[in-house]
Image (cartoon, rainbow, N blue to C red):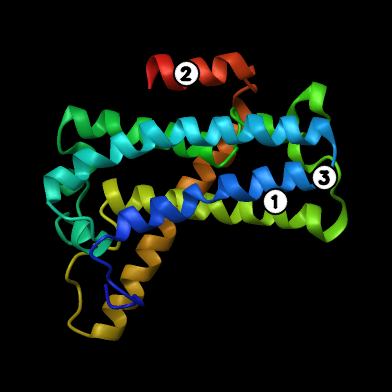
Amino acid sequence: GDLIIADMNVGILYVTSVTALVVVGILMAGWASNNKWSLIGGVRSAAQIVSYEIPAALSIFPIVLITGSLSMQSIIQQQGWAPWDWFLFYSPFTFAAFWILYTALLAEGNRTPFDLPQAESELVAGFVTEYTGARYLFFFLVEWGNLYVISAILVTLFLGGWQVPAVTGNVVLLNLLQFLVFFAKSYFGVLLIMWIRATLPRIRVDQLMSTCWKYL
């Protein structure tokens, strides 16, 4: 609760805005390769990420309306440590919103089964065709880091964040416990993403877009 740099009153809006900038990097990577296939891969990837921004944003709205706040600290504070006090189980609508957001964030993070930008058979490796070595690695380091960000956002909005029972009056111990609980919840989310990767097959690009526009 105290291990924060700034409690922004538009916290969740800021986080979603910053993550939306991924599109710019991917488009620039595809275009700067001077390869038409990489450019097509970049455009396809941008279409995927921009499309899934919409269900992601809409599924965040219920939590904002319930709490009356965009501050991520305030959203956590209005939940309890017990699962029945989490927004995930607040109503059937928030339960549905959680899974819609989870699916949309998987697609935004280019994770299986939505990892078409790097894995299109006709585009070799999508927007990263012309990159090797460290530059190639940077794209994937960002994606792997993004797994934790995806999970942390879900934990903050729906899974009680750092809330723990009041087991001690020591502020340092309490903050350490809160940190460990938040970390464990977030890493369980990462484990779930890895589990999905090992379980589900990749979908086609038309199925990807129809999932977003027709269903989510």
The structure residue drawn at horizontal position 28% and vertical position 28%, both measured from the top left corner, is 96
C-alpha separation, residue under disc 1 versus residue under disc 3: 17 Å
Q: Which quadrant of the figure has residue 185?
A: bottom left
Residues packed near mark 3 inside 10 Å, few (<14), some (14 to 19) or many (20 plus): some
Q: Secondary structure at mark 3?
A: loop
> In front here: 165 or 156?
156
Q: Secondary structure at mark 1?
A: helix
Asked if disc 2 and disc 1 are in contact, CB closer than 8 Å, the reply is no
* Amino acid type indicated by mark 3: Ser
Residue that numbered label 2 is attached to: 211
Q: Residue at x 85, y 37 (%)?
A: 35
Q: Nearer the viewer, residue 73 or 90?
A: 73
> Does any portion of residue 185 appear in the rendered image?
no
The image shows residue 57 at horizontal and vertical percentages of 34, 39
Tell me if mark 1 has few (under 14), some (14-19) or many (20+) residues whose alpha carbon lies within 10 angstroms of its own. few
Crowding at mark 2 (Cα within 10 Å: few <14, some 14-19, many 20+): some
Q: Is residue 87 visible?
A: yes
Residue type, mark 2 in image: Thr
Q: Is residue 164 above or below residue 19?
A: below
Q: Quick one: label 1 or label 3, which is nearer the N terminus?
A: 3
* Residue 93 horizontal side relative to residue 205, left or right: left
Q: Residue at x 72, y 32 (%)?
A: 41
In the picture of the structure, the residue carrying the numbered disc 1 is 140
Residues at marks 2 and 3, CA–CA distance in whole angstroms:
30 Å
Give the mark nearest the N terminus, 2 or 1. 1
Quadrant location of residue 203? top right
